[in-house]
Every structure is written in C-alpha cells, then in structure tokens.
Amino acid sequence: MATTEKRSAMQTALYPLDWLEERSGLVGGVRYFLFRKVPGDTGWWHTLGSATLTAFLVQLVTGVILAFYYKPDVDTAHASVEHITNDVWGGWLLRGMHRWGASVFIILLFLHMGRVFLFGAYKYPRELNWIVGVLLLATALFEGLTGYLLPFDETAYWATVVAININGTAPFVGPYLATILRGGAEIGPDTLARFYSLHMLLVPGALIGLIGLHLYLVVRLGVSSPPWSRAAADREPEPKPPPTRSGMVTPAPRPTGVRRRPSE
Ligand code: HEM
C-alpha cells in the first residue's frame, strides 16, 4: 500500500518533467549531457573547462543583478556604482564577485586552454573546437575590456584610452577601429553607451552562442584521454604492484611456487 502511494506521489511530482520530455526531448538531452561516458583515465585537469563555464555563469548572474542598479551615463555611472557598493544590500559582495570574477574567468580560460594545448587535445578530430576556443578567448577578452570602462572613474577612463590607442595602431584598420570603439573623435557619453551595449548584449550573446557550439562539439567528439593513457594506446593497464608484506599487513594467499617447509 505504502509503495503504491509512494509510486503515485513520484508520478505526480515527475509529471511536469514527463510532460516536457514528451513534447521536447529536452530532459533526455540534459540527462545524456550529464551522464554521458567519458574516458576512465580523465582527471582533475579535465575539470578546468567546466570550471571556466561555472565562472562564466557567475558573471552572467551577477551582471544581470548589477544592471538593475547601474546607470550608463557619464554623470551618473560612477555614482551608481558607489551606490551599489555602499547602499544596496549585499551590493559590495555582488560587485566584488563580478569584478574579481572577471579575472577568475580569464585565468581559468587560460588554464583550460593550457591543459588542452599540453595534452594535445586540439589534434584531429578536435581542431574545429580549438578554433571555436580561440574565438571564445578573443570574445572573452573583449568582454573584459568593455566592462572595464563602466565604473567611469579615472582608472577606467585612462585604461580605455590606452586600449583604444593600441587598437588605433593596427595597420590599415587601426584608425577606423579606434573611431568605431570611441563612437566619435573622443571618449565620452557615446563611448560609454557603446561599451555598455556591447558589454551587456552583443558580447555576452556571442559568448553564449560560442559556448553552446563549443559544448556541442565536446559532446559530439567526446573528451580526449590524457597523453599518457594506456587505454587510448590500446595497451594493457599498468599491473598493480604486489601488496607489501602480504599475509601480515594485508592478508593474501601465498604466491604459488613457494616451497613449504616439511614441518608445515
Ligand atoms: C568560455 C570559455 C570556455 C568554456 C566555458 C569551455 C568549456 C569546455 C568544456 C566544459 C570542455 C570539456 C571538458 C574539458 O576538457 O575541460 C572543453 C573542452 C575543450 N575546449 Fe574549451 N572552453 C572554453 C574555452 C576554450 C578555449 C579558449 C580553447 C582553446 C583555444 C578551448 C578548447 C577546447 C578543446 C580543444 C576541448 C576538447 C578537449 C578534449 O576533448 O580533451 N576551450 N571546453
């Protein structure tokens, strides 16, 4: 009786998921993504991609909440950031997470890329995913650049002057690039509006699209084994070393071929 009740309670609780699965196949897709098989000899190094993804999601959530309070105008931008830090409940933490989280995201991105490079995981058939990764890296750095101007203090202003001037030195396209970034001849209200729009809409949208493509390729191609993998090289696994002092510390049968004394 109790089992029947339990089963019907489970069915009721899972009904929304069943409903969704029947009409979209989404639940099965998520389950496949989460429980798909990966090589048995993957280790901590393989978690850097997911760590980068987590850092990106933290940036998304904290950024959306910051946007509730931030005012993208040269006269009010800095005051609105001060207001978030000093007056809004938990605002100092939110802003700190977003500001420091940006560095964490970029550091993890480089560590993940370093892992992929050193493990040779960019080789056939994963070259396209490496190319998507390079686009991700450039887009993520641009996200950092556009966000840096938003507090609109001295550091933000002069850092942006330097960054735009560096872009302006690029051959042929440099001067055009600098004008496009500034939104005119000088850094001012148009630059802030432009950077805000890029930072909030265009660049995160591009990042989400690229990450989606990147993860699709990861699932499609499967995760690679580390270079030292014996399984990937079709070799027998390393034999386990014999237990030390067998029969005393770890009880184990005596090795065969050992002659016993006549008295035994
Ligand atoms: C927002 C940035 C990124 C996110 C969220 C991300 C996420 C991931 C995840 C979750 C994996 C699977 C697990 C793992 O191998 O760690 C992966 C694999 C991979 N990533 Fe990234 N990644 C990013 C940036 C990059 C960059 C910058 C590159 C290289 C330029 C790159 C190249 C690759 C390659 C080639 C693989 C396949 C590795 C293998 O199969 O062993 N990724 N990525």
Image: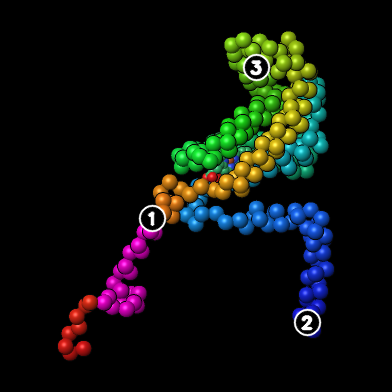
Q: Amino acid at mark 2?
A: Ala
Q: Is mark 2 within 8 Å of ligand 1?
A: no
Marks 3 and 2, Cα distance to the nearest angstrom?
Answer: 70 Å
Q: Earlier in the sequence, mark 2 or mark 1?
A: 2
Query: Which labelled disc corresponds to residue 54?
Result: none
Tell me if residue 239 is in the magenta stretch. Answer: yes
Query: Which labelled disc corresponds to residue 164?
Result: 3
Q: Is residue 89 above or below residue 33?
A: above
Q: Where is the N terminus found, in terms of image quarters?
A: bottom right
Residue plotted at (47% across, 54% down):
41
Residue 142 position within the rendered picture, expressed as x and y whole percent measured from the top left: 65, 27
Q: Residues within 10 Å of mark 3 (few under 14, many from 20)?
A: many
Residue 124 position within the rendered picture, expressed as x and y whole percent measured from the top left: 50, 39
The local secondary structure at tag 3 comes to helix
Do labels 3 and 2 touch, CB within 8 Å? no
Q: Is residue 165 above or below residue 31?
A: above
What's the magenta bit mostly, secondary-structure-wise?
loop
The residue sitting at the left extreme is 262
Name the residue that disc number 2 marks: 2
Name the residue that disc number 1 marks: 235
Q: Where is the C terminus found, in terms of image quarters?
A: bottom left
Q: Is residue 52 visible?
A: no
Tell me if residue 249 is in the magenta stretch. Answer: yes
